[in-house]
Amino acid sequence: MNTTGDEPSITSVTFYALLGSVGILGNGLVLVVMISIKELRTTTNAFIINQSVIDMMTSILLFAMFIAPPLSVPESEPAAEFVCAIWNSKYIFWAMTVASTFNLVLLTLERYVAVVFPVSYRNHFSNRRTPALAAVPWIIGFVYKIYWAVVNQHSNGNCDVQYTSPQLKVLAGCMTFLITFLLPLVIMAFAYSSIEKTLRQRVDNDVAESNRRHTMNADRTPNPPANHRERARVETALIQVAKKQTTKYQPH
């Protein structure tokens, strides 16, 4: 694979430019709103900010690594190895996509604990621990994709993907599918189904309690409080949006 000779098509350039522009503008707007409004500085929103930072940087890298031509391979062997492994391999971009996926998993688990185990959430989640938790997806992304930097090597003035054996290449593909797609999908599906079940149970309990009180006082209505109904609608909508988000993360 000669990475120095790859020329993206007009269609690819247009697609990457559109996708990158939307990502930069959309995530930039989220960051401006989240950072400028003090009331939005919560633990959950900290992970949303982290998600926006990751996705905006990924969008910028679309321009730098998929639209701009690859760097010429230097004559110096150490410099050539660096260019092939880190830049022309697009290692940073792929690491960021993995970080984005696992930050979404972290955000999902944070909501799962908050809804299903509220007491544990209050005891263990705090603003002091948020920065450390936010760093986890970045670490996972750059550590996991290091193998991609390793197999992109300098050879005879070119950047080539070199696996030591065909079996290792197949193993790398299977691991990528499992770690960056299937595992996050299973975790998020379980978490959101548990959240939805818990919220429905709470609404049912509210209705039952309201009906019980209604039998004791004819002037009371059997309908659940409006705030509970509204909360259920909002949470259900968020669940549906989050479920749809899982479809955008495909194996790299």
Image (tube, helix red, strand yellow):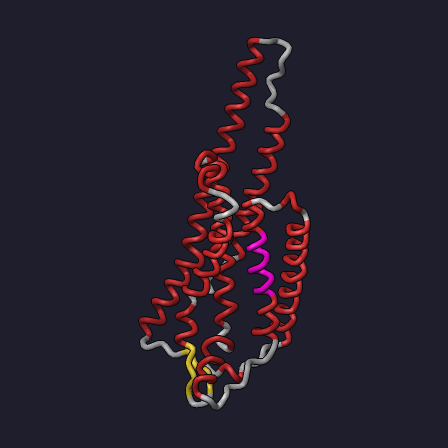
Q: Total of numbered circles in the picture?
A: 0
* Residue 122 drawn at (x, y percent): 48, 37
What residue do we see at 51% from left, 28% from top?
202
What residue do we see at 66% from left, 58% from top?
28
Most foreground residue, 153 or 200: 153
* Residue 56 drawn at (x, y percent): 60, 62
Principal SS element in the magenta part?
helix
Residue 70 occupies which quadrant of the picture?
bottom right
Q: Residue furthest front?
A: 128
State whether residue 131 is above or below residue 75. above
What residue do we see at 56% from left, 50% from top?
46
State whether residue 47 is above or below residue 200. below
The answer to whether residue 41 is left or right of residue 117 is: right
What residue span does the magenta drawing correspond to?
Answer: 49-59
What residue do we see at 52% from left, 20% from top?
208
Most foreground residue, 248 or 85: 85
* Residue 107 drawn at (x, y percent): 51, 48
In the rendered image, is residue 102 in sight? yes
Membership of 132 in magenta stretch: no
In the rendered image, is residue 195 in sight? no
Most foreground residue, 12 or 46: 46
Q: Quadrant of the N terminus?
A: bottom left
* Residue 157 drawn at (x, y percent): 46, 89
Residue 182 occupies which quadrant of the picture?
bottom left
State whether residue 223 is above or below residue 44. above
Residue 227 occupies which quadrant of the picture?
top right
